[in-house]
Amino acid sequence: MTTTEKPGEAGPEAGPRFFRDTATVFQREITPSLREPTAILFSMAQPLLFLFLFGPLLAGTSGFPASPWQWFVPGILVMMCLFGPMMAGYNLLVELGGGSLERMLVTPLNRSAMLVGRTLKEFALLLVQAVLLIALSVPLGFQLHPAGVLAGLALLLVFGVGLGSLSYVLAIAAHPGGELFYAVTQLVLFPLMLLSGVLLPMDFGPAWLQVVARINPVSHIADAERALFAGQLLDPSVLAGGIAAVAIAALGLLLGTRAMKRGV
């Protein structure tokens, strides 16, 4: 008696196959970006504008709990993580329109690997940009704490995987028109960013705004990033930020895997 394994169905070698398929999808996704490295530099335009044009304004402002650069640079990294992975679904919309994703869905590729490989590509680009931004920040007065920087980047990885997965779910739901994707991302992105205090301390705002910010998970992740980049690995905000990032990643992977298994 023989059995036929459905596309994407878990088999006896599910573990090794998951990592192999993740590597295959990651290589497929990252190759076009490696062929056009200038596009990565152009995508740095907005963070660099904030760093060199907005950062000096904060450097002359009092009231920060630590050095303004130590406070501002982690906030910029969180902002980059918001915009990069959250807009990752745009590429999926293009593939849906061209029919290439449907062709991938009939292959034996693991569905979760298809999702994780794509989100890891987004984080790889984010990591390159983050390293460049941190290197440019050091001459401005940013102090490096290697252990904290590594922990902070790991936290961004978890957060980015969750956001990227949710973006893919939204792209599948918005197919074929795509209008829903653009409407929801614009509607969600800016309130999340403005209410997270990545650009200015929420302590400067009125009490009601601070209350709203407390229920924003991104504000907890931003606080955790600032503590980690300051070398305060055991700060209570690190635990709160870690819980928020893991919750977003778990939700994104759960919904994303379901969407991939269901197909489009």
Image (cartoon, grey):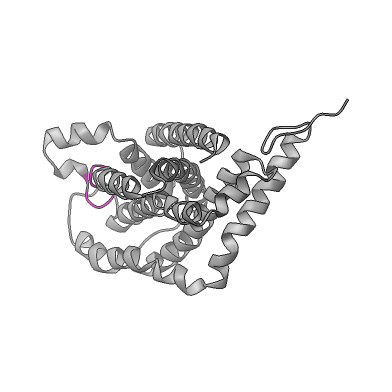
Relative image position of residue 49 (x, y in whole percent): 29, 67
Most extreme residue toward the right is: 1
| Secondary structure, magenta segment, majority class | loop
Relative image position of residue 181 (x, y in whole percent): 35, 47
Residue for point 78% across, 35% down: 13
Closer to the camera, 9 or 32?
Answer: 9
Relative image position of residue 38 (x, y in whole percent): 47, 74
Vertical comparison of 24 with 241: above or below: below
Assess whether residue 195 is covered by the magenta stretch.
yes
Residue for point 68% across, 33% down: 9
Assess whether residue 205 is covered by the magenta stretch.
no
Query: In terms of image quadrants, where is residue 137?
Result: bottom left
Residue for point 18% across, 62% down: 60
Q: Quadrant of the N terminus?
A: top right
Closer to the camera, 90 or 122?
Answer: 90
Vertical comparison of 45 with 153: above or below: below
Closer to the camera, 190 or 88?
Answer: 88
Tag count: 0
Residue for point 23% across, 63% down: 54
Q: Which residues are magenta?
A: 194-201
On screen, residue 241 versus residue 25, left or right, reads left
Most extreme residue toward the top is: 1
Relative image position of residue 10 (x, y in whole percent): 70, 32
